[in-house]
Image (cartoon, rainbow, N blue to C red):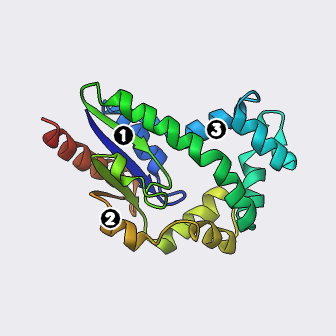
Amino acid sequence: MLVCGLTGNFSSGKTLALGILKDKGADVLSCDELVHSYYRDTNSEVFKKVAALFPDATDAFGISRVKLAGRVIANKTDRLKLESIVHPRVIADLKKWIKAARGKKGIAIAEVPLLFEKNLADLFDYTILVYVKRQQLISRIVKQKRFSKSQAEKMLSLFLPIRKKIREADFLIDNNSNLKIFRKNIDCVFNSLNKINI
């Protein structure tokens, strides 16, 4: 099986892209969904450690990502503490998924938000980047997530510059236009992967 890593900046459309690729037949994994599952499972080690460190970030459903984001975006020390708890577990589960996928046929795609930031590209046969121009991305974050412009810029500062990712990625999916064109761009990449995978 061809195993690919899908990434992109915050609110770039990578989750939507993953869903479309799943509909096309790809075997998919979302690292964001893995984190959600840890935060919802009050018996998980991740939940227990995060709740102990950030007790004000819990709610009736587990760990609130909104409350947590408010803490860690503004505080680098808190962010690094959170990453030291969450990232090793995510990476371990990602590696297990990749190992299992290698024994199957077809195309497997994992959505990994910090793929390049955490130097995970070598885990994959190919990397795919969902790309949005910075100013357009800031506008989307402000509109969709109700962040202030400064909050949006702070969030994006946690990622590598997009120009560096463009140089490193094997495939680009442009999401600077509308959904129809976005789907067409995804089709082109998926078709290319299928040709490679013959």
Q: Secondary structure at mark 2?
A: helix
Image quarter of the C terminus: top left
Residue 63 in sight in this render: no
What is the x, y in percent for residue 175? Answer: 39, 59
Q: Residue at x 65, y 52 (%)?
A: 84
Q: Residues within 10 Å of mark 3 (few under 14, many from 20)?
A: some
What is the x, y in percent for residue 188? Answer: 22, 49
What is the x, y in percent for residue 177? Answer: 38, 61
Contact between labelled residues 1 and 2, with CB atoms less than 8 Å apart: no
Residue sitting nearer the eye, 186 or 46: 46
Q: Secondary structure at mark 1?
A: strand
The earlier-in-sequence mark between 1 and 3 is 3
Residue 190 as seen in the image, left or right of residue 143: left
Q: Residue furthest top?
A: 104
- Between the C-alphas of marks 3 and 2, the distance is 28 Å
Q: Residues within 10 Å of mark 1 (few under 14, many from 20)?
A: many
What is the x, y in percent for residue 63? Answer: 76, 41
Q: Which residue is mark 2?
A: 168
Residue sitting nearer the eye, 1 or 183: 1
- Between the C-alphas of marks 2 and 1, the distance is 17 Å
Q: Which residue is mark 1?
A: 109
The image's mark for residue 146 is none
Q: Residue at x 17, y 37 (%)?
A: 197
Q: Amino acid at mark 3?
A: His
The earlier-in-sequence mark between 2 and 1 is 1
The earlier-in-sequence mark between 3 and 2 is 3
Q: Amino acid at mark 2?
A: Glu
